[in-house]
Image (tube, helix red, strand yellow):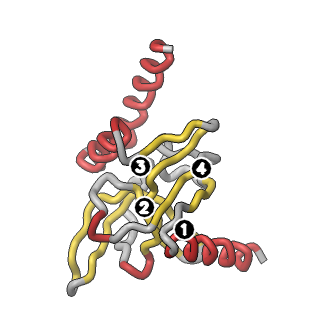
Amino acid sequence: MMSEKNNIILNTALHILNEELLVKMEVAGNSMYPFLREGDFIFMRKDAMHLLKPGDIIAFKRNNYWVAHRLLAAKLNHGEIIFLCKGDSCVKCDEEIQKNNFVGKIVAYSRNGKKVDLEKGWQKKLGQILVTTSPVNKYILNLSMRVIFKIKRMLR
């Protein structure tokens, strides 16, 4: 029953994305922790695959679910773009993401009612840095996020 409801919701969201509108969904799981946390809301739109850059967070289909992970690299395989992705708190990369499994790009998230744009400022730069430090990013991200939040609290 849950799988059927999940499919209906995801198919509706796909239709909305194909109409070039934003889709807002709640994060479930911790594979992108601490950047994205369970209970955060993500805002997704359909972008052309060739416009995506390492550091972007993309959504893709895996079984009956959608997964949002960071894009590490893109390559061409027989003329088709293939993505290599990984969750920020994951040790291993995902299986290659092909065009038919690509859903959209995460362009913003909200936490505690505050919306954060991932296409501007330090959030975008942090995504790019995380790609270059992927093997140790879990530790670097935890430390950098703590420092950033402490600085923000001190500036309030």
Three-letter code for the amino acid on which mark 2 is drawn: Lys
| Residue located beneath label 2 in the image | 105
Q: Earlier in the sequence, mark 1 or mark 2?
A: 1
| Residue 17, above or below 71 | below
Q: CA distance from mark 1 to mark 3?
A: 16 Å
| Residue 79, above or below 138 | below
Q: Earlier in the sequence, mark 1 or mark 3?
A: 1
Q: Residues within 10 Å of mark 2 (few under 14, many from 20)?
A: many
Q: CA distance from mark 1 to mark 2?
A: 12 Å
Instruction: Report the side of 2 relative to 37 (left or right).
Output: right
- Describe the element under mark 3 as helix, strand or loop: loop
Between circles 4 and 1, the one closer to the viewer is 4
Image x and y of residue 148, in percent: 41, 25
The answer to which image quadrant residue 115 occupies is top right
Three-letter code for the amino acid on which mark 1 is drawn: Trp
Q: Earlier in the sequence, mark 4 or mark 3?
A: 4
Is there a contact, CB below 8 Å, between mark 4 and mark 1?
no
Q: Residues within 10 Å of mark 1 (few under 14, many from 20)?
A: some
| Residue located beneath label 3 in the image | 88
Residue 41: numbered disc: 4
| Residue located beneath label 1 in the image | 66
Query: Residue at left 44%, top 53%?
Result: 107
